[in-house]
Structure formats: C-alpha cells, structure tokens
Image (spheres, grey):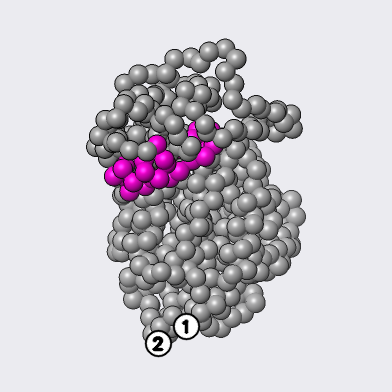
Amino acid sequence: MTVFSAPPAGAVFFAGTHNGRRGTHTLRMDRITDLKQTLTALKRRLPAEDILIFSFRSADGRAFACVYADALTDKDLLGEQVLSPLMRYRGAPAASAICECVTAPEVRRCGSLRQLADEVLAGNPVLLWEGMDEAASVGVKKIPVRAVAEPPTDVVTRGPREGFVEDFKTNTALVRRRLKTADLRIDTLTLGERSNTAIAVCYLRGIAPKTTVDAVKARLSAVEIDVLPDSSYLTHALSSRPHSLVKQVGTTEKPDIFCAKLAEGRVGILADGSPIALTVPYLMAEDFQSAEDYFVSAHRATLTRLLRLFALLTAIYLPAFYIAAQLFKLQLFPIKLLLTIAGSIRDIPLSPSLEMLLVLLVLEVLNEASIRMPKYVGMALSVVGALVLGETAVNAGFVSTPAIIIVAFSGIGLYAVPNLIEQTSVLRLAMLLTAGSVGTYGIVLLSAFVLLYLVTTENFGVPLAAPFAPLVRRDCKDALLKYGLPSLHMRPKSLLSRNKRRMK
C-alpha cells in the first residue's frame, strides 16, 4: 500500500470561487479523463493523512488505484470483494466491465471529482484505472457504532426495549423490520454544506397526507447550514413558529413508537449521527402517553395518564398559588394549615417570593450538577443537596419547611412528563413571578393567555391542542383517556390520514 505524495506545483484540475456571505467554496469540476491527473486532483481535494491510496496492477498489467478513508473502510471486504478480483482481471477498461468484475453488492459509477471526494468522505472506496472514462465507488464502509440497547429516556417494564442508535442504516433497518410493507417510503436527503448529513423522510404511502410529506421535504430542503450534528437542529425548520416556547415536533428514541406514529399518518425524520427521531404533525396529547400504556389494561393506562396531567399541573401552579395566598389571599388556606405556615415562616428574613425563587434556583443548580457530573459523584451530590443542604437551610432560618416541600413536589411532578420539562419549567417560573407581583388574578390571566396560545397554534395544518380544541370525539378515545383496542379501529381524524380505517 502506498500513500500518494503531495502533487506537483501547478497541477490544479478544478477552480474555486469564494462566496464571502456564507464562507464556502463552489467548485467547478472537470470530467475524469486520466488516472494520474485524477489522483493528483483528489489528493489536492483531500489532503488529510488518513486518506490513503493503494496502487496495484491487474493480470494484464493495467494500472489501478483505490482511494479510501482509513478509519471508515472495511479492509477485509475491500481486499476480498474488490482488490482480489481486479488483480485477476483481464479485459477492457470500460466502467461497466470493471463494475461487473467487482463482487461487492454496492457499486456506483462516478463521473466527477466532486462525486469521488464525497464517496471517499462517506467511507466508500473509489476505484481508478488506466484508460478510464468513469470511476467507481464501492460500498464497503465500516463505521463504528454502539449496540442497539434500551434508550435511557424511554424506559419501560413491558414492551420492546430496542432504541435508535447513531448509525443511519441501523435506524432505517429497525424501522423496516417493523413495517414489512412496500408502502413504507424512506426518502433520503443530504443536508449540511460540510457535514453532508444523510436525512431520511419516512412515511407510509396511502396513509400519510401527500401535502404533509411535500411540506416536510420542502422545509428540510430549505435548510442551509454548514454542519448538522443532530436532528434537533431541524426542529426550527419543521415548526410553524420557530421561536415559540411550545414544542411543535414530536421526538422519540424507540422504533416501536416511531413506527406506530407512522401507522397513524405522521411523517418521521431520521438524521445520521442522532438517536433522536422526529415526527410531525405533533399533538400535545402525545407526551401524556407512554409506550407501556398499550401493554397494560385500558383502565390502568387511563389512570396513569390522568396522574401525569395532575402532576404536571401541580408542578406548574403549586408554587405560584402558595406565594399568591401568602401575599394576597391568606383566607385561601384552611385555619389549621394557616397557623402551621405562619409558625414556620415567622423568623424567615426573605419575602415569600424571594424565598421561593431561591429554593427553585438551588433545585435547578442541583439538577444540572447531578446530570453533568459522573454517575457516582452525581448520586452523592443529590444526597448532599437534598438532605444536608436542605436541612441546614431550614435549621439556619434561611428558608421555611413548606417552601422546601412545595419545591420538591413541584420538581418531582415535572418529571412525570419528561418530554415537556423544558417548557413547563419556564412556565412554572413565569407563573411564580406573576403570582408574586399580581396575585391570583395574574395567574388566571397568564393561564388564559397560555391556553389561547395553545388552541390557536397549528403545524402542518393540524392543531396542537387536538383532539380537545377543536373537539374530535373519535380521537378522544386515545388521548388522555384510553379505550380498549376494539374501540381504536379508526386512525386519528386530527392527523388528516388518507386511509381512515386501520382495523376491521
């Protein structure tokens, strides 16, 4: 194996013009005509040391060269399926004959230097030979990936435990494994000027609305970004209100949930390098559902969903109503509870609003520190923060015991619906500030504004608050309530599915 040396000065086979606004280069590629010139141009295009060139000759003495990325190529397959057959090759230098000689299942022709460079960077070795009119790329890449395992964000006690990984082909295989139908469409796009990230738009033909599929592709095609490291970068392009606090794109790490949403008429998006799959249109009721709800009885699933809603509302409103009652409406407390609270806050030097803000701030800091720190250190930090720091602060008279209890219960309630933590934590802070300055009237007005905003927000023609606003009675059978399987024979009407019936 030989590594190609630096090309001679002046051997430039493509020119570039610089775009000052975006800082990128637009290359003008020449057609492939000569082995030596093509190798020189490729090395100028790919000067990295891990881009290697293996030169050899066929049985009839014809010169060949294989250009590949060292860390992304399966060298065993390359030698067995590509190099060995070509070393025994005797025949014409036509690209069709060369491609037939190679035994690899994925062989593509390339007609420009830009295509060759993209294939090498993607991990596919390219073949060049003396007297060629075209080049060829071979799909024998080997990208290191982690094994399929249960995702940490969607843990279940019943149901499938597989989760998406960072490998694009593995994720599409997990989807194809569950939807063995010719109607499954996986349309591939490439985004990112420098990363060339593969994006898969997945949907079921005949079920997903064609207008939604076309709108998703149009919004993704309009994305202009240098590097696309994760699918979360696409949520702004897929949202009708990109700067809204309310999420408008569904997320999941489980293939079974992803396929179930496709079967209801949604469109899914997979990004290479990301284990998070996106789905649109999104309904807020999705986040109160769990994959485990479909493996337990309908009564248990309904009770669990109502508990999640109660925990979320309590987490948002409990600190705000506690402050409003202390400052403006003491008569809201029962007399015995009022006496207990009055005794606990008697010597507290801080105002009720400042006290609650301080405890919430400490809770957020402890939460961030426990997540970012190593696993075992994070557990010790949680114990120190919850027991030692909290108990010491109460004994020292900085904060009251009711404030600690309320903030702790509020923090636990937020995690009952983990997909909405980002939005509800901000909303809880807004409710607290409003309650401390205006009181219960401010809480009611802010709640009315949030409710109005939710019922007027839609994405891809589907209201965010459906099936409650507008009310779709048929879809309410699998929203906060969970009916039995025989009652769910129709697909959700809110998603505008083309095929309405899913079970006879």
Q: Mark 2 points at which residue?
A: 504
The answer to whether residue 246 is above or below residue 106 is below
- Amino acid carrying mark 2 in the image: Lys
Q: In which quarter of the image is residue 346?
A: top right
Q: Residue 501 carries which label?
A: 1
Queried whether the magenta region covers residue 487, the answer comes back as no
Q: Residue 141 carries which label?
A: none
Residue at image location 37% in from the left, 66% down from the top: 179
For the N terminus, the image quarter is top left
Q: Is residue 298 visible?
A: yes
Q: Nearer the viewer, residue 418 or 71?
A: 71
Percent across and percent down for residue 371 are 44, 39
Look at the numbered disc 2 and give the secondary structure of its residue.
Answer: loop
- Counting from the top left corner in percent of width and height, residue 8 is at 53, 13
On-image quarter of the C terminus: bottom left
Q: Which residue: 55% across, 75% down? A: 497
Judge whether residue 99 is colored magenta: yes
Tell me where residue 334 appears, x and y as whole percent.
57, 65
Position of residue 436 in the picture relative to residue 115 (left or right): right
